[in-house]
Amino acid sequence: MTGFVARRLAQMVVVLFAVSVLTFLIFNVIPNGDPASRMAGKSPTESQVEAIRAEWGFDESLPVQYVKTMEQVLGGSAISYFTQLNVREEIVRGLPRTLSLAIGAAILWMTMGIALGLLGALRAGRVSDRLLTFVALAGVSLPVFWLGALMAHYLGFKLGWFPNGGYVPLTEDPLDWAYHLVLPCTALAILFIGFYSRVLRSSVLDTMGEDFVRTAHAKGLSERQVLLRHVLRNSLIPIVTLWGLDFGAVVAGGAILTETVFDLQGVGQYAAESVGQLDVPPVLAVTLFGAFFIVVLNTIVDIAYAALDPRIRVT
Amino acid sequence: MALAFGVLFVVLVLGALVAPLWASTVADRDPNRTNETGKIEVDGRQVDVVSLEGVPIGPQWRGEYFLGADANGRDVMVRLLYGARNSLLIGLAAALLTTILATIVGLVAGYFGRWVDAVARSTLDVIWAFPVILLGVALGTSLAVGGLQIGPFELEAGSMAISILVIAVVYVPYMARPIRGEVLALREREFVEAARAQGAGPLRTMVGELLPNLTSTIIVFAPLMVANAILLEAALSFLGVGVVPPDPSWGNMIDAGVDKLVTAPHLAIAPGLMLVLTVLALNVFGDGVRDAFDPRSSAAWGTRRP
Amino acid sequence: MSEPLLSVRDLAVSFESEDGVTRAVDGVSLELAPGEILALVGESGCGKSVTALSLMGLLGASNAVTTGSARYGDSELIGASDDTLRQLRGEELAMVFQDPLSSLNPVLRVGDQIAEQILAHRPVSRAEARAQVVSLLERVEIPQPSERIDSYPHELSGGMRQRVMIAMALSCEPRILIADEPTTALDVTVQAQILDLIRELRGATGAGVLLITHDFGVVAELADRVAVMDAGQIVEQGTVEEVFERPQDAHTRRLLAAVPRLDAPLRRRPAAVGGDGPILALENLEVSFPVRGRRLRRGGPGPVRAVDGVTLSIEPGETVGLVGESGSGKSTLARAAVRLIEPTAGSVSFAGSDITRAKRRELDPLRAELQIVFQDPYGSLNPRKKARDIVGLPLRCNGISKAETARRVEALLERVGLEPAHADRWPHEFSGGQRQRIGIARALALNPRLVVLDEPVSALDVSVQAQILELLDDLQRELGLSYLFISHDLSVVRQVSDRVAVMRAGKLVEIGPVAELYASPAHPYTAELLRAVPVPDPRRRAA
């Protein structure tokens, strides 16, 4: 087991390294602009540009720049090219917002997704199942940013049922915090509810056809017992692993659109703004943070899979 | 029902491609031609296309300005159709590219195994580790600013090809993994051994024996990939890094429309609805395809966006 | 005459689908007395499994229509309510299925799965149930029951899993035990043990056993009465002696005649065509697989030696049979012999030249001489290729033109007993026997001298099996082929071989001329194997 974990950690480091290099290259090699002159604003003088270049180290070779920037990012001292604010602080500030959104949406989509999926599987082939499938497909087809914008406008602005944006920290006012999160969490969750309900439905239907379910019936167990102890238990395994991957992806940046639409000022929004301005340090930091999250969750998912399915442990 | 939607989708696509012709016969030919100061006749009166406060007219439900005008006085319907052409073209091309790349990667990685597989998986892992939207935005932004030169090929900044490339690459891991998984399973089947015993080399085995058995997976994934691609394109355009205004794309139209929800909701609703309907049609079609090929398969599970 | 436990009258099951109505069971009537073992025997598709499942209400398919009557005591099983069935299942009627690996929930411990049944029917505490499970495991002779109780299904061997299934079925002391092909997935020695177990338990509990099987040997060993099924109907019924010695029905007679028997007279085989040395020679062959991956169990073994120093040679024109149980390494040996796998040590020589380390290039011309036919008619043909492309592949790989290939393919299909029109069909349009013929045609395409046959008839019904064996025999005579015939079925091997080799755990334990080996085996393992084979003759039953 330790060998496995050690291997995964090593893999993680390699992947993160590759990600950081790639990000750095994307932003420094491809755009033909000169970051220094971009930062200098409108009609800079030559010496201004030079000064910026020297200060930020743009005159040095790429590998050196990379190492320096990475040092700063990992050390927590990186500063945005544009806002001059410390990147780490910005990320720390945005993290609870992103996490609130992600966790809220995740709980919502898991419970609803499993419930609807189970319902669909039990009523497979009937009208109610077809209807549920259609609703699920619709959910999956809605672009989050459009849905979010419409929700914010009609449910928030027009009808005033919910606030149409902004974030209230949990520590300030828990009720208001939750209140502000209802719309964004729902908007984000709808996509996944559609997806997960269909995955679960598939999984349950597959499991119900397995031989051991027939054995369970042959033992004289009630429908409910068969469903809970055998069918659900086995069909949830792929769901749990998927959930880990999706949750990681959401925190890592999948929440960008929702955060932007609802102006939650989370990590995703920060990332979007920085990327738009080709602001390398925050982008690097956020990308690494995101990749790290995804890779960690990937590993947790693999371990969870082994814990849930004893057959995996031996291979 | 699935086939009905499939047909609907095909109609949409054809409509979008034919759109420019239709537009020219009925309304303003150029989707980008602004008309801020123009006036049109409504119920006998002359009305500003864009009011003095900047509010464009709503849907007229006839001929010119069928769905109204946007803040620059452009015809929303015409832009919608041209936008459809862009979005669908990008979506289809990206999905096609993804399919080709993913099939090749999945086949090669699954068949050869060991170090080839390790390299492929690591590359896929790296791409996958990138938060998808960030990767899309990052590539889109930097390429949008600077363009791209791959050997003799040069892509202009802001061209559609860049969007296609970005979207295609981003989704390769999503499709390559299941294909690789299936190749791994197929590889153990006796008929593959039999082919090797007959003297078939790697290429003949991959193309002759494995590929025909992958077609059902590929066909099932294809509509989903198109749907994914269209949604991602819309998301990227919404964030400003896909199709760049003034060229219309459903995504950037929504972006422009969101600001004006109060005064002119049709600006955001129209493109959004088109987007939803198209993607829904694709999903229902894909679902139908999946049912037709293997009602019990868990291979394809609908569109998702990370 | 005591009252029958189970009384079935005119049972009929039909399935509705878009292709029409299929009558799987078409008017079956039988009776099961207490303490008796009734065997329901027939080939695949005859409806025996469907009969058994319908009695327990386990058909599961929503498009099944069941009519008729099956009375158990006061209850009518056909059309019974879910509640009634639930009470009866496990408590009065229990079932053991064919494949214990897929019939047990892979993520739950076996002890929990047995306890679950007890707890569903008896008002006992968890601790009491667990104690009962331990004694059940003891009764079915599972070693170290108090430890095994916490094992997962995949951690147990096939035989042990089936014992667990039996323990589970018996946990509430049912009056009727239905066993659906309980030993088909097991090795012959394990099968013998399980059959003994069933017999002994029947004696101890007085339960009635409905035994579903396709194996006449098993029937002869175990059954008191026999019902033979064909196309959904019972064509013959009687005591086991009656059916075996004086079969009335033509179908029964045909089946019995096709069953290969250990005590049948050996056919005179023409002397093998002598030549210049053996056509295939294996010398101290070793094939090892490295074991990788994380292991949570302690003391992981080193590399697995699938083939451990085997020396074997085949003379031109002869058939060497290779027998062994699962895990003996015979399949690995087969693949190493045709160089699908590279041996880790030792040598393989074909017609005098050493091909052990030959690269792909060098092996290509060899492919023409040395071919292989696989076991699984369903897996060995690419489902997405037509018969002509499957058979034609070796020809195309060798640069033969399309036109010539087409011609030869037709000739090959005819030679194996198919028609040229079959060339354009897909694998799923053929029966198991026909698919195996296609596999043989494919192997013959390049006129090989030696054909390795890896369990070529094991997946086929006994009547089809006889036809294929006859085909192979004809081809050998006509083309002067040499065969390496691998199988776990000793009776079949005896019928086709000149010499027989016995493998166990990667080693060759005995090799010799077929008559001698079977009459007086030198090695105790061979003797054990031969003893375990169920003989389709009720007079020769083990006591």
Image: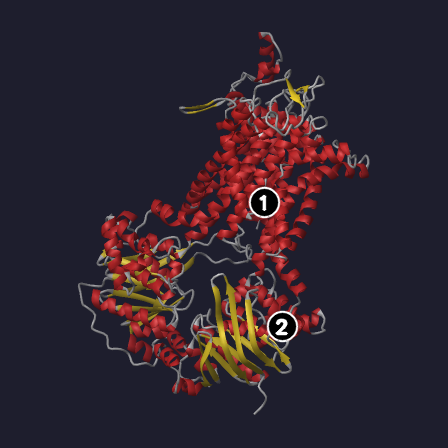
Q: Chain of mark 1?
A: A
| Residue C134: numbered disc | 2
Do the residues indicated by labels 2 and 1 lie within the same chain of the protein? Answer: no
Instruction: Specify whether C507 is left or right of B278.
Output: left
Of B247 and C382, which appears nearest the observer?
B247
Residue pictured at 36% horizontal, 54% vertical: B193
Residue C531 spot, x, y in % from top left: 40, 79
At mark 1, the secondary structure is helix
The disc labelled 2 sits on which kind of residue? Val
Instruction: Specify whether C97 is left or right of A98.
Output: left
Residue pictured at 23% horizontal, 58% vertical: C447
Q: Is residue C369 above or below residue B248?
A: below
Q: Is residue C246 above or below residue B68?
A: below
Which residue is under mark 1? Answer: A299
Q: Is residue C368 above or below residue A268?
A: below
Q: Is residue C337 above or below residue C195?
A: above
Res C434 → quadrant: bottom left
Of B235 and C168, which appears nearest the observer?
B235
The disc labelled 1 sits on which kind of residue? Thr
How many marks the image carries: the answer is: 2
Residue C345 spot, x, y in % from top left: 34, 56
At mark 2, the secondary structure is helix
Placement of the N terminus of chain C among the 4 image quadrants: bottom right
Res C476 → quadrant: bottom left
| Residue A40: numbered disc | none
Q: Is residue C293 visible?
A: no
Residue pictured at 71% horizontal, 42% vertical: A104
Q: CA distance from mark 2 to mark 1?
A: 38 Å
